[in-house]
Image (cartoon, grey):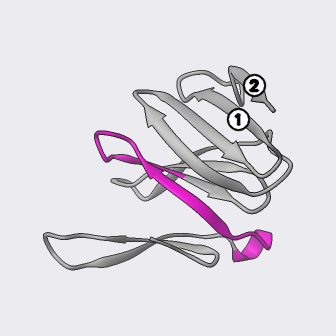
Amino acid sequence: VGLGSCVYLWSAFTSKVTKLCDLAESDDSVTSVSWTKKGSHLAVGTNRGEVHIWDTVKCQQVRTMGGHSARIGTLAWNGPLLASGSRDRIIYLRDARVQRPFTARLSA
C-alpha cells in the first residue's frame, strides 16, 4: 500500500505490516505501485517522476530509474519489462535487466 511518502507491505499469512520505504527525506511521495507477476519485486512511481524497484523479500531497493518530468500515475509489468506512464504524457518502456533507464519512449 502506498500512503503519502511511504510504502507498506502486509502479509496475509501473518497479518504483519512492514514499512518498505519512506520518501520523505527526498521530499517526494508515492503515486503508483505495481507488483511483478512472481510477487518478489515492487515498482514504486513517485511524484518527482522516478521509478524505484524494490526487492520485497530482502526489503532492499534494487535501483532507481529517472526519465519522467512529472508524476508517474501508472506502472505495469510484463515479465522483466516495465511500462511507466506519467502526467508528462510520455510512456517509458523499461527493461529491469539493463542499466539504461529506459529502452523505448512513446509520447503523445
Q: Is residue 106 left or right of residue 81?
A: right
Dot 1: element: strand
Rendering coords of residue 60 (x, y %):
48, 54
The N terminus lies in quadrant:
bottom left
From this view, report whether residue 44 is shown above or below residue 18.
above
Residue drawn at x 70%, y 20% is 104
| 19 and 32: which is toward the camera | 32
In the figure, is residue 23 to the left or right of 83?
A: right
Secondary structure category for the residue under label 2:
strand
Q: Dot 1, crowdedness within 10 Å: few (<14), some or many (≥20)? A: many
Residue ID at (79%, 42%): 89
Q: CA distance from mark 1 to mark 2?
A: 6 Å
**Tag 1 near tag 2, CB within 8 Å:** yes
Residue 63 on the magenta segment: no
First of labels 1, 2 by sequence position: 1
Residue pointed to by mark 2: 105
Region rendered in magenta: 24-43
Residue beneath the point at 45% across and 27% down? 80
Q: Nearer the viewer, residue 74 or 39?
A: 74
Q: Which residue is mark 1?
A: 91
Quadrant placement of the C terminus: top right
Counting from the top left corner in percent of width and height, residue 58 is at 38, 54
User: Residue pushed farthest front?
Assistant: 108
Give the image location of residue 23, x and y in percent.
67, 70
